[in-house]
Image (cartoon, rainbow, N blue to C red):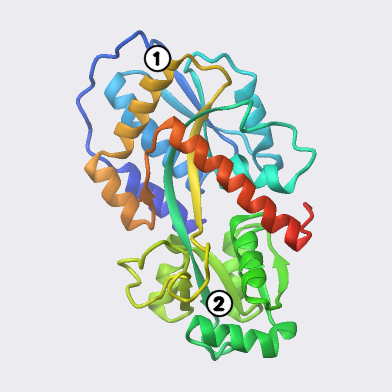
Amino acid sequence: MKRRVLIASGLLALPALRPAAAQGGWPSRPVTIVVPFATGGPSDIIARVTAQHMQQVFGRPFVVENRPGATGEVGARQVIRSAPDGYTLMHAPISTWAINVALRPNLGYDPVRELTRITQTVRTPNVLVAHPQQVPANTPAELVEWLKRNGRNASYPSSGVGSSDHLTAEMFKQATGTEMAHIPYSGGGPAMTSVISGTTQVSFQNLGAVIGHIQSGRLKAIMITSDSRSPVLPNVPTALESGLRDFVVYSWQAYGGPPAMPAPLLRQVHEAIVAALKVPATEQRLVEAGFDVVGNSPEEFAAFQEAEIARWRRVVQAGDIKPE
């Protein structure tokens, strides 16, 4: 959590921008951005960065409201019940937009039918890391060989059942025919600590969360799940290079709104959010924190989201994964 707060402080220290006149009447009053998780995480950080920019541009308050609970369901339901007038938006991660649908058959909201998809904001790949002393493998092939010999005695942590790091590890097990025990924790920090201490041996974690530990030697990087090598880890191969097909995996964030937002309003809100993401100082700081800026169209985001739901549903079903 301490690292995330530091990242947030750096990202929010942006130069003031000259306010511009709002067009089309929006916004004429404060805008609420619901984040369905606690403060300090990636969803909260990106929401506050974009809120700050839009507030400066439009001269209206953009207020981030954290509404954690039920893996994003509490906040999502609040947004769904709101008027589709652009004054209540939601910024949420992959779990709220896709994994919940795949994992929870009795989910109390439908992010496909009940939310307006606006744009995917950022994405970050996962890095397969291992304890330097407990795991002798240094390449993906060596790790698979080691797990096939020692997997019953090996374990991996996650930030919780159904989290991106959990399902990416399950996907890896299914793709390689290996075994590892899953040890769920209450968040990414405790999960990371367990690998560093040697309580668990390997883990898939977001690039920004592990880069410092890799550089310090507390963890070693085996593989990255991006579609190309990362400039901050140029010697670490991708999953595709390692022979794993269909293993490009990103943890991602996105903006949405209540159902039935009018098309002209949707375009205006979309343009405002993407402009906030593309401010050079903002984009540079996001990249330095391990994020890729996306800012795709509502149609592109909708198609991507539905493909992600289908993909993670296959992983959940193949692994017979049950929610907590």
> Would you place residue 270 above or below residue 155 in this image?
above
Residue carrying label 1: 264
> Who comes first in sequence, dot 2 or dot 1?
2
Residue carrying label 2: 196
- Picture coordinates of residue 250 (x, y %)? 49, 55
Give the CA separation, mark 2 to mark 1.
50 Å
Is 70 left, or right, of 17 in this rendering?
right
The residue lying toward the viewer, choosing from 9 and 171, is 171
Q: Answer yes or no: do the residues labelled 2 and 1 have beta carbons within 8 Å?
A: no
Residue at figure coordinates x 48%, y 39% from the top left? 254
For mark 1, give the secondary structure: helix
Q: Is residue 37 visible?
A: no
- Name of the residue lying farthest toward the left: 18
For mark 2, give the secondary structure: helix
Q: Is residue 293 visible?
A: yes
Residue 241 is drawn in which quadrant?
Answer: bottom left
- Picture coordinates of residue 162 (x, y %)? 68, 54
Q: How many numbered discs, if any?
A: 2
Residue at figure coordinates x 23%, y 19% from the top left? 20
- Picture coordinates of residue 297 (x, y %)? 40, 33
**Three-letter code for the amino acid on which mark 1 is drawn:** Pro
- Comparing marks 2 and 1, which lies closer to the viewer? 1
Residue at figure coordinates x 70%, y 31% from the top left? 109
The residue lying toward the viewer, choosing from 187 and 171, is 171
**Three-letter code for the amino acid on which mark 2 is drawn:** Ile
Residue at figure coordinates x 46%, y 67% from the top left? 210
- Name of the residue lying farthest toward the top: 25
For label 2, count other residues whose C-alpha is less than 10 Å away and answer few (under 14), some (14-19) or many (20+): many
For label 1, count other residues whose C-alpha is less than 10 Å away and answer few (under 14), some (14-19) or many (20+): few
